[in-house]
């Protein structure tokens, strides 16, 4: 492929398919080798194409890695959002915990991609992590007829840390029962937020 694809026209079906393939391949390469070792050459080799072909679709290694990271985050947000939307307000925090753990346990390459991105300065503002759960906890308290209670920010931060620990353990030990751990976390969350 000569040159670089310009952004002034829509992607063809073939171009979109190739970009999607490169995003998936990049997730696997970053998950297996880490961000630093995820070179254009390694991505191209894993995709069975040349570095020039990768550069036709993405301006740089950073661009293809950023696209892969965005894909992983979009999938996570969509999956958790669907689970939360399907749950009643009083059960939304439990749905959030179960699906967050489930999604990342089912997709270890996605979990590793997120970890690698965080290591390489792609950390979102901390409120982006705890605020959605704190909001769900507040709505759940209202749905249960409960007034002001514990500091929901702190409970959400602690819960996020526990989710990270469960997913981390699952990455280290694929036999670890992340589903049972998520249920234990839900029980602790219920006790802390709604007692």
Image: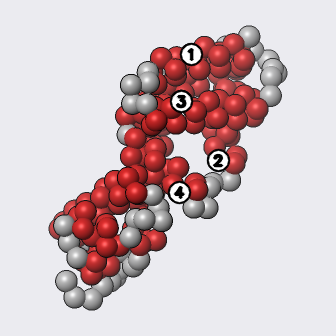
Mark 2 / mark 3, whichever is N-terminal? 2
The quadrant in which residue 17 appears is bottom left
Tell me, for residue 184, which label it has, or none.
Answer: 1
Question: Tag 1, which secondary structure?
Answer: helix
Per the model, the C-alpha gap separating discs 3 and 1 is 11 Å
Label 3 neighbourhood size at 10 Å, few (<14), some (14-19), many (20+)? many
Determine which residue is flagged by label 3. Answer: 166
Label 4 neighbourhood size at 10 Å, few (<14), some (14-19), many (20+)? some
Say which residue appears at 48% left-offset and 65% top-offset: 36
Label 1 neighbourhood size at 10 Å, few (<14), some (14-19), many (20+)? few
Question: Tag 4, which secondary structure?
Answer: helix
Say which residue appears at 53% left-offset and 30% top-offset: 166
Give coordinates of residue 41: x percent, y percent: 31, 73
Whether pointer 3 and pointer 1 mark residues with C-beta atoms closer than 8 Å, the reply is no
Whether pointer 1 and pointer 4 mark residues with C-beta atoms closer than 8 Å, the reply is no
Which quadrant of the figure contains the N terminus? bottom left
Tell me, for residue 128, which label it has, or none.
Answer: 2
Mark 1 / mark 2, whichever is N-terminal? 2
**48 relative position to 116: left or right:** left
For the residue pair 111 and 12, the one nearer the viewer reads as: 111
């Amino acid at each position: 492929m000569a040159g670089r694809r310009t952004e002034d026209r829509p992607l063809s079906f073939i171009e979109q398919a190739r970009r999607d393939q490169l995003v998936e391949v990049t997730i696997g390469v970053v998950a297996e080798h880490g961000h630093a070792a995820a070179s254009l050459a390694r991505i191209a080799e894993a995709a069975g194409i040349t570095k020039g072909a990768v550069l036709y679709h993405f301006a740089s290694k950073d661009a293809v890695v950023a696209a892969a990271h965005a894909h992983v985050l979009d999938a996570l947000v969509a999956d958790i959002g669907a689970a939360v939307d399907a749950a009643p307000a009083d059960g939304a925090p439990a749905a959030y915990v179960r699906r967050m753990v489930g999604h990342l346990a089912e997709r270890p390459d996605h979990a590793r991609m997120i970890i690698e991105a965080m290591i390489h300065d792609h950390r979102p503002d901390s409120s982006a992590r705890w605020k959605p759960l704190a909001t769900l906890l507040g709505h759940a308290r209202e749905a249960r007829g409960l007034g002001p209670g514990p500091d929901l920010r702190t409970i959400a931060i602690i819960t996020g840390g526990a989710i990270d620990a469960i997913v981390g353990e699952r990455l280290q030990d694929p036999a670890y029962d992340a589903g049972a751990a998520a249920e234990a976390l839900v029980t602790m969350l219920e006790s802390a937020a709604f007692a």
